[in-house]
Amino acid sequence: MRFLPAILGGGLCMLVSLSARAHPVAFEGSTGLMGYHSSDMTDLEVNYSVRSWWAPSVQLLRYTRGTSRPDVVLGKVNFLAYRWNGPATQANIYLHGGGGVSRLNEERRGVYHLGVTADIETRRLYFAAEADTLRDRISAQASFWKVRGGFAPYLADFSGLHTWVILEARQLDLAQEKRKVEIIPTLRFFYQNVLWELGSSLGGDIYFNYIIHI
């Protein structure tokens, strides 16, 4: 049974390496480009992992339909607050926050952002949740949450194409508009330093997401 620790250790190393590519903080010295695109929301973020547990970033957010102009510009910091490694499992909690300028509600205001992201995964199963709020000095301008779970239909080698089938529920609320909860079946792919996702809500809205670390 001497080979069992080696197998488990190798699986954990692969899991940790793949997992780092999908998170707002990656390997020390790496630069990350993250994008989330749909008809009702665009989220673009560029970060730099100063250490393996924190990464400052710049983020552009669009919540207004029918325009490409960002509604919010933020400077942020992402922190790895907690990590647990089991024999073939990893769990993470990330905290992120910052401040900037918002043009929501048709006037420019200073805002601050707070959020938390948590996930737990094996090479076969994946669960994650996220909650974010954007507030000015008076009230919330926007809030967003999502929960998702999925599975890998096959196990690939480290250098191969990794595929996940995911089901996501999400909701975006604005100060003047409460949007409905959306259910989004999604396909997720890893290849080398690139992660990308393609999904469609039950109403037919298309979602495209990506994370690239260099």
Image (cartoon, rainbow, N blue to C red):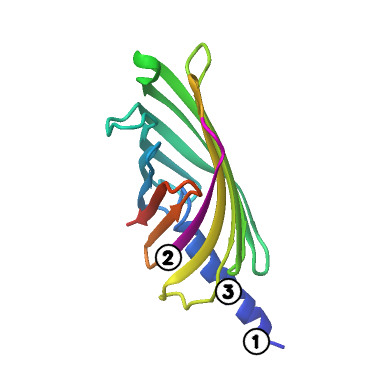
Whichever of labels 2 and 3 marks the residue nearer the N terminus, that label is 3
Whichever of labels 2 and 1 marks the residue nearer the N terminus, that label is 1
Q: Which residue is mark 2?
A: 190
Crowdedness of circle 1 by 10 Å Cα count: few (<14), some, many (20+)? few
Give the Cα separation between the discs numbered 2 and 3: 16 Å
- The local secondary structure at tag 1 comes to helix
Which residue is more in the foreground, 56 or 138? 138
Report if the CB atoms under discs 2 and 1 are less than 8 Å apart. Answer: no
Number of the front mark, 1 or 3: 3
The quadrant the N terminus occupies is bottom right
In the image, residue 184 lies in the stretch drawn in magenta: yes
Is residue 179 positioned above or below 125 on the image?
A: above
Crowdedness of circle 3 by 10 Å Cα count: few (<14), some, many (20+)? some
- The local secondary structure at tag 2 comes to strand
Is residue 57 positioned above or below 178 on the image?
A: below
Please state which amino acid type lies under the numbered disc 2. Answer: Phe
Residue drawn 46% across the image and 61% down it: 188
Q: Which residue is mark 1?
A: 3
Give the Cα separation between the discs numbered 1 and 3: 12 Å
Q: Which residue is mark 3?
A: 11
The answer to which image quadrant residue 62 occupies is top left
- The local secondary structure at tag 3 comes to helix
Magenta stretch bounds: 179-190
Residue drawn 37% across the image and 35% down it: 59
Look at the magenta stretch and give its main secondary structure.
Answer: strand
Q: Is residue 130 shown left or right of residue 41?
A: right
